[in-house]
Image (cartoon, rainbow, N blue to C red):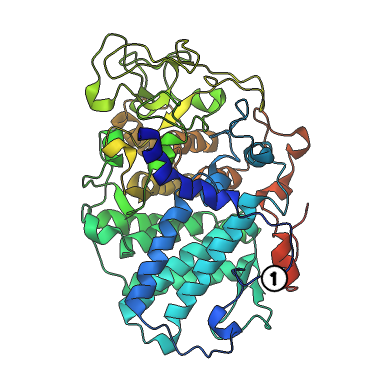
Amino acid sequence: MKNAQIKKYLLPAILGIAFMSCSDLEIEATDRIIDRSTAEGGIFNGVESVPASLDNIYNLLGPNLIGTGGYTGLQHITTDEQIVPTRGTDWGDNGLWRNLHAHTWDSSHAVVVFTWDTWNEIIFLTSEVIDPRSNASQEEVAQASFIRAFATWVIMDLFGQVPNRAPDEGPEINPVVLSRTEALASVLSDLDIAIEGLPSASAGDMDILKRGTKAAARFLKARVLLNSGVYNGTGIPISLDEVISLVDEIAAEGFALQSGYFDIFQESADTETVFWLPTNVGVLIYGSLHYSQGIGGWNGFSTLSEFYDIFEGDANSNAFGIGQEERRGFVPGINESNETNKGIGYGFLIGQQYNADGTKTKDRTGKDLVFTREYPGLIGVGEANGIRVLKYHPSINNGFVNHAIIFRYADAHLMKAEAILRSGGDATAMVNELRVLRGATPLGVVSENELLEERGRELYLELVRRTDMIRFAQFTRNWEFKDTNSIGDDTKNLYPIPSNALLTNPNLIQNPGY
């Protein structure tokens, strides 16, 4: 019954990946490029209900940010942060996950296709709300502009070009395609509209923060500006001073760093959450946990030992209280009653795992469940290979909590530090402020490399690793199990345009390298 409960919540997220690949290049009525009402001869006169349309858009946003594949997979599994090896017959999926980590994806890769389709759909739906014929209020236009900016940024960041279809254009019209620089300008324009029309919210106003606010729009604008040197091809961000001022404006509304790292990822109010979504985070928990832990995990997602090693603490143990920094978490000890956390640790789970009563957890063969640092490869992997990672914890409602943090102030804090560093200033004090709060030893000096690692330590599994690594020119470096032909291949900084999209819109041009 418990496993059935897990599948009830997790299967939709997995099935969204399982059925999104299609070798048939015929245009079907389900293709995201088609405006169904127009395709059937209808005329667009505005959406029937703006509030209902916005609710639908926000309901789409959550599952497309928090899941096993889609955007989550493209941001995490393609980096040093996460790996999904094939364990016996589990997680084989015709190489779906291995190809992401090895950087051997192509234009038909199911996760690539799914991400392209769903985020372009969100762009189109927001454009319908923004269209004057929908008669949306200023705040409603601002909400739609915020999400359109978010979705356009996702496509621009991942694929480098963005199709742009007007609400009243049917499938016979090939959408114009925005170049990366044109898409950048569009995103910034939408964010300015959002900042003007969205409500203000103080830190801790959780009911308001699950939708767009001025702080959320400023946060996204700071992120886009910090990466703008990648998008405009110059390597030089448009305005580092504005990144700093945007973060200061966020702080002026009461957002601030907060102690108690893992408490931030619970449902209670805090000073760090800038934007969250009421979408289920169970897949982020049970995708990683072993079959025998808690109410049963899926035993897929883990991390590389080299990523674990950027944290302060013993390389071979993460037992409670052995001097590791707070963000690395801990594994409860033997003979300790751990009913409140089901015997499951926080952060990085390595070594012997324990049950809620303090006894040793066993694997499916009856052996002690000991998570190891190493893997024999991407295939032929044992069920205990790999360090597991938990940021949200299964002790709360068995992990089925509808509370996913999307933007967090610690990220803004580090964006400001980076803007100072890239402007020729010293970011050491700002970085050390965060490190001391998290129980880590202060750094003597902060360079770009240390700043990237600090972002990894603070923001792991928060949808930023790939984008960060590209900005710091680290995404194409070598790490364990990356295909040797992909090492140093900068064409991998963009994903391929899906084959079906090229067929349906000749204005799209395949990205170099594909």
- Mark 1 crowd level (few <14, some 14–19, many ≥20, 10 Å Cα): some
Which of the two residues, 471 or 422, is positioned nearer the viewer here?
471
Which residue corresponds to the image point at 51% horizontal and 70% vertical from the top-left?
A: 123
- The relative height of residue 357 versus residue 506 in the rendered view (above or below) is above
Secondary structure under the numbered disc 1 in the rendered image: loop
Which of the two residues, 501 or 1, is positioned nearer the viewer here?
1
- The relative height of residue 432 versus residue 189 in the rendered view (above or below) is above
Q: Position of residue 201 (x, y in %)?
A: 24, 61
Q: Amino acid at mark 1?
A: Ile
Which of the two residues, 275 or 10, is positioned nearer the viewer here?
10
Examine the rendering and report whether any part of residue 476 can be seen.
no
Q: Position of residue 350 (x, y in %)?
A: 45, 19
**Extreme-front residue of the structure:** 1
Direction from residue 42 to residue 368 in the image, left or right: left
Q: Position of residue 398 (x, y in %)?
A: 30, 36
Examine the rendering and report whether any part of residue 130 can be seen.
yes
Which residue corresponds to the image point at 39% horizontal and 25% vertical from the top-left?
A: 293
Which of the two residues, 242 or 150, is positioned nearer the viewer here?
150
Where is the N terminus found, in terms of image quarters? Answer: top left
Look at mark 1 in the image and give the residue it sits on: 27
Which residue corresponds to the image point at 69% horizontal and 79% vertical from the top-left?
A: 174
Q: Position of residue 254 (x, y in %)?
A: 22, 53
Q: Report which quarter residue 164 is drawn in.
A: bottom right
